[in-house]
Image (cartoon, coloured by chain):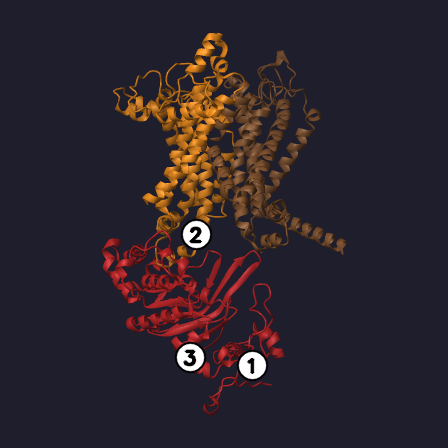
Chain colours: A brown, B orange, C red
């Protein structure tokens, strides 16, 4: 009997997965985004193997060389070099690691805390809910970047602190979303049935309610991932995030800002890297939203 | 209607206290002894230390300090800048009009272009026009705005020599700061060409700051319109023989605006955050640049005061948006 | 000359799964003052035909007809601007869900005076008295107090009355009512129908009543058109149809009425209306028809004596006109 139930739930899950993939793959752009993202992950993982030079290696004689296709460029430094003679391409490839890790950690932190708080708020109600929501309102009253700046001022500059600061500013979105979903699910019959069967609050929250709120949370997670990359770069640009010589894309732009007019490639390419990464994730996120939203499903 | 306004105001009270808590706690959270932190590199002798402790009330229990802080805030005293020795509130409001001018222009830019773009995309759903607008919109909010600013400067200011690189006004002009809004002040000044220069300096920063709100507003308008256009009452409007323009602009848009206004309200916080970056890039003398400078120069009172005031702005704007929402959506008020 | 002349109207929708024929060769002819009911289950295309007339179908619809003219004007070749001058003024339509069919952002006075201003010019404000008159006409008590009301403050019946007031404001020659009472309570249903008939008599306008409720048809209409899966299967006068249904579908519809239930269960028609993907070969009704023969399953029927059937049920002689539950199988 038990084997039967496990096979049925397995096949149900496979069916759901297949259905999801069908809707997702309808959007060519979403699939393109996914492919690009996978490519970026591979690039980040194998950065040491792929990049032509070490990101920190300085070629003093070759400072501010333009990209290979421009006059004075060389194939050796395909995207040119920066003010210290470091290869732009290698730095950008290694920077992908930092951005992707930052995105992951930020989303994991803000989502896990946010979902937990949201579940508790929606489930408990009363003054617990009020307190949680007022705290979230307070965080939302301060513009994200400013809040992150202040937090980094307290914690000190650096990539890790920047990630924590940004994660804190993203938490309210997850809290609100989860609370709204919890509130709408909590009165449904299956929850009441579980309660009657004796399920405790933890089981109710995580096993009964949470799985049904996943769709908007996944979409929000993707959105937060891309915004996290942008915010990490912004803090890096302001000098409050990843510190030089870390090749974080925002930091790269900041450290080459003085050469902006004489060697524009040093600021252009890191920015393009940010743009492409965020674009890919947003495209994928759009596809996810269309695939997961039951209202948009067409028969 | 008044009741509705009052209720929204009431919700803001705990949030206000929350923000004061954050602002207050921020200095206390800094590692190390507060007085030494405030003194910074200047250092402080032990007697001076004891003096300052009582002077700043730092020997009192924390909650008492907090309440005296809130008391000060409500009276308008937000501390004194450690760098310039002027009241923080005074510095803030001196620089605020510059940011407000930029933010208002950016928001107008975003609304005037964004809403029609969204409407056109919705009405021409599925066509190349729709896909084009949505692609541009996607690119718009996927871009790091500080990079976008630098790129535009490289392109327009350097290569094409079309726009100035920084500041609000060409140094050739001397304009009396009456309102703080350069556009207004330059209009009323005697200097010929000052207005044009002010406008000239506003172009790039406005575009850079307004890009993300533009993209978001276009998207949201499109999706709100799509939803509305499939509603029954739009069919009724058509059945009355009304012109397509009237059906879209009056019947559909009015309902779509309900959602879009909320989105616009949310964009204000985005604008203020973006102002920090934009002002840094264009050397725009507003509160964004001031706050960054304060953070870097460890002017903690300035940061604290700035935090509180900026959050206050966001709250006020959100309140106004809520009121507007109530006006537009009869279901709330009646 | 007839007020409304439709001959062989066909409407096809372009969908992801191919072309859907929602209306298939429907014909209708109306004179001023006629009351015609169009009956059928959901999916019979009864609303679509009228929406095509009004020009309210989405761009995915292709409308073809031998003739479609109103008051001498050809609706097929008309440009949108000319059409907009007619609808809301000479032809009006009221819809099924009054609660969602009124714009939630505007009050009653605005929405009614808007249609007057559109067709007769002038400022909306100047029509205030006419609006009050109209609200009175549709039976809304104390109309002056309702002028500033918003749709969400109105009940279902009230909303429908406002809708009717809006659509008869310009004194149309033809009013199409698409299931006007389906979303309303039974007691309100009777009131609204009465109102429609009253208005029809008072203004001498033609009324097309789309419904799935045979009882409503019996009470209000002169003539009936029965539609099934987009096709027009029978068109007769009401008394004739009720006494002597000739198409098996009509007969099945009538015998499904509670009045004709012999035992505890109603005589439901087995099966479902064919959708886009399961259209039967031959006669569209054959899978559900208790008189179906081999010919029915192979070839689509031609119209004979106005009935779309290979073996229409016979005309009863005057002697046999008593019972309608009497069926004969034709061999």
The chain letter under disc 3 is: C
What is the crowding at mark 1: few (fewer than 14 residues within 10 Å), some, or many (at least 20)? few
Q: CA distance from mark 3 to mark 2?
A: 39 Å
- Say whether mark 2 and mark 3 are on the same chain: no
Return the residue at label 2.
Answer: B229
Q: Quadrant of residue A53?
A: top right
Disc with the residue nearer the chain's start (3 vs 1): 3
Quadrant of the drawing holding the N terminus of chain B: top left
Who is closer to the viewer here, A28 or B332?
B332
Whole-Å distance between the Cαs marked 3 and 1?
27 Å
User: Which of the numbered marks, if any, corresponds to residue C263?
Assistant: 1
Q: Which residue is mark 3?
A: C238
- Residue C71 shows in this picture: no
Q: What's the CA distance linking mark 1 and mark 2?
A: 48 Å
Pick the front one: B327 or B56? B56
Q: Nearer the viewer, mark 3 or mark 1?
A: 1
Q: Is residue B9 left or right of residue C15?
A: left
Q: Residue at x 45, y 45 (%)?
A: B222
Q: Describe residue A62's horizontal placement relative to residue B132 as left or right.
A: right
């Amino acid at each position: 009997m038990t084997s039967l139930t496990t096979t049925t739930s397995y096949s149900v899950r496979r069916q759901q997965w297949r259905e999801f993939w069908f809707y997702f793959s309808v959007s060519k752009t979403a699939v393109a985004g996914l492919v690009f993202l996978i490519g970026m992950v591979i690039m980040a993982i194998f950065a040491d193997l792929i990049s032509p030079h070490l990101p920190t290696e300085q070629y003093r004689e070759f400072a501010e060389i333009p990209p290979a296709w421009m006059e004075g460029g060389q194939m050796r430094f395909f995207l040119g070099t920066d003010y210290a003679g470091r290869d732009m391409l290698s730095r950008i490839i290694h920077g992908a690691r930092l951005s992707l890790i930052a995105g992951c950690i930020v989303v994991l932190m803000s989502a896990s805390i946010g979902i937990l708080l949201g579940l508790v708020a929606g489930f408990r109600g009363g003054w617990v809910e009020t307190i949680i929501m007022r705290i979230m309102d307070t965080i939302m009253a301060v513009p994200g970047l400013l809040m992150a700046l202040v937090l980094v001022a307290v914690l000190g500059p650096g990539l890790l602190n920047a990630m924590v600061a940004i994660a804190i500013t993203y938490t309210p979105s997850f809290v609100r979303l989860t609370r709204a979903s919890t509130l709408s699910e909590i009165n449904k019959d299956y929850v009441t049935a579980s309660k009657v069967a004796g399920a405790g609050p933890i089981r109710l929250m995580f096993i009964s309610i949470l799985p049904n709120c996943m769709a908007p949370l996944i979409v929000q997670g993707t959105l937060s991932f891309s915004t996290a990359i942008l915010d990490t770069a912004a803090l890096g640009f302001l000098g409050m995030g990843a510190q030089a010589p870390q090749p974080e894309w925002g930091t790269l732009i900041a450290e080459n800002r003085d050469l902006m007019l004489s060697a524009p490639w040093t600021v252009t390419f890191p920015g393009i890297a940010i743009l492409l990464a965020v674009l890919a994730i947003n495209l994928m996120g759009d596809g996810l939203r269309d695939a997961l939203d039951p209202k948009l499903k067409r028969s | 209607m008044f009741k509705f306004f009052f209720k929204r105001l009431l919700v803001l009270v705990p949030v206000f206290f929350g923000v004061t808590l954050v602002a207050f706690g921020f200095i206390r959270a800094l590692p190390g002894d507060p007085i030494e932190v405030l003194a910074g590199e200047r250092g402080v002798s032990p007697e001076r230390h004891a003096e300052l402790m009582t002077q700043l009330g730092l020997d009192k229990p924390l909650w008492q300090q907090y309440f005296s802080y809130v008391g000060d805030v409500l009276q308008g005293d937000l501390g004194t800048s450690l760098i310039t020795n002027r009241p923080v509130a005074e510095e803030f409001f001196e620089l605020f009009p510059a940011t407000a001018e930029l933010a208002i222009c950016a928001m107008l830019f975003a609304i005037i272009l964004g809403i029609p773009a969204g409407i056109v995309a919705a009405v021409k759903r599925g066509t190349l026009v729709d896909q084009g607008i949505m692609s541009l919109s996607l690119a718009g909010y996927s871009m790091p705005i500080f990079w976008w600013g630098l790129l535009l400067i490289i392109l327009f200011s350097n290569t094409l020599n079309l726009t100035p690189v920084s500041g609000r006004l060409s140094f050739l002009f001397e304009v009396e700061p009456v309102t703080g809004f350069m556009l207004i002040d330059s209009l009323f000044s005697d200097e010929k060409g000052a207005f044009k220069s002010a406008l000239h300096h506003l172009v790039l920063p406005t575009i850079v700051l307004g890009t993300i709100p533009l993209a978001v507003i276009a998207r949201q308008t499109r999706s709100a319109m799509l939803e509305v256009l499939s509603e029954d009452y739009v069919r009724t409007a058509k059945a009355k023989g009304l012109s397509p323009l009237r059906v879209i602009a009056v019947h559909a848009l009015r309902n779509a605006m309900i959602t879009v206004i909320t989105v616009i309200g949310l964009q204000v916080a985005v604008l203020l955050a973006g102002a920090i970056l934009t002002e840094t890039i264009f050397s725009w003398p507003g509160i964004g640049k001031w706050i960054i400078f304060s953070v870097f120069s460890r002017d903690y009172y300035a940061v604290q005061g700035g935090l509180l005031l900026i959050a206050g702005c966001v709250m006020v704007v959100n309140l106004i948006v809520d009121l507007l929402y109530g006006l537009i959506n009869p279901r709330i008020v009646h | 000359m007839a007020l409304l002349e439709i001959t062989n109207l066909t409407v096809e929708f372009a969908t992801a799964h191919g072309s859907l024929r929602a209306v298939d060769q429907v014909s209708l002819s109306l004179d001023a003052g006629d009351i015609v009911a169009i009956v059928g289950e959901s999916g019979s295309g009864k609303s679509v035909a009228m929406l095509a007339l009004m020009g309210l179908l989405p761009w995915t619809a292709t409308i073809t007809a031998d003739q479609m003219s109103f008051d001498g004007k050809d609706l097929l070749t008309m440009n949108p601007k000319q059409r907009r001058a007619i609808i809301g003024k000479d032809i009006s339509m009221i819809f099924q869900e009054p609660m969602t069919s009124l714009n939630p952002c505007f009050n009653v006075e605005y929405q009614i005076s808007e249609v007057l201003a559109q067709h007769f010019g002038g400022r909306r404000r100047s029509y205030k008295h006419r609006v009050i008159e109209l609200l009175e006409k549709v039976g809304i008590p104390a109309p002056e107090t309702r002028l500033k009301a918003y749709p969400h403050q109105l009940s279902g019946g009230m909303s429908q009355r406002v809708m009717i007031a809006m659509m008869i404001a310009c004194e149309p020659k033809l009013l199409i009512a698409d299931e006007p009472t389906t979303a309303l309570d039974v007691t309100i249903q009777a009131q609204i129908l009465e109102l429609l008939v009253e208005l029809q008599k008072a203004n001498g306008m033609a009324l097309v009543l789309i419904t799935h409720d045979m009882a409503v048809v019996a009470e209000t209409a002169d003539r009936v058109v029965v539609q099934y899966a987009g096709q027009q299967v029978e068109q007769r006068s009401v008394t004739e149809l009720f006494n002597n249904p000739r198409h098996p579908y009509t007969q099945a519809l009538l015998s499904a009425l509670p009045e004709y239930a012999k035992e505890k269960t109603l005589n439901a028609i087995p099966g479902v209306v064919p959708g886009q993907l399961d259209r039967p070969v031959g006669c569209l009704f054959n899978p559900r028809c208790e008189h179906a023969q081999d010919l029915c399953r192979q070839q689509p029927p031609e119209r004979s004596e106005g009935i779309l059937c290979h073996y229409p049920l016979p005309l009863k002689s005057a002697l046999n006109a008593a019972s309608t539950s009497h069926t004969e199988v034709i061999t």
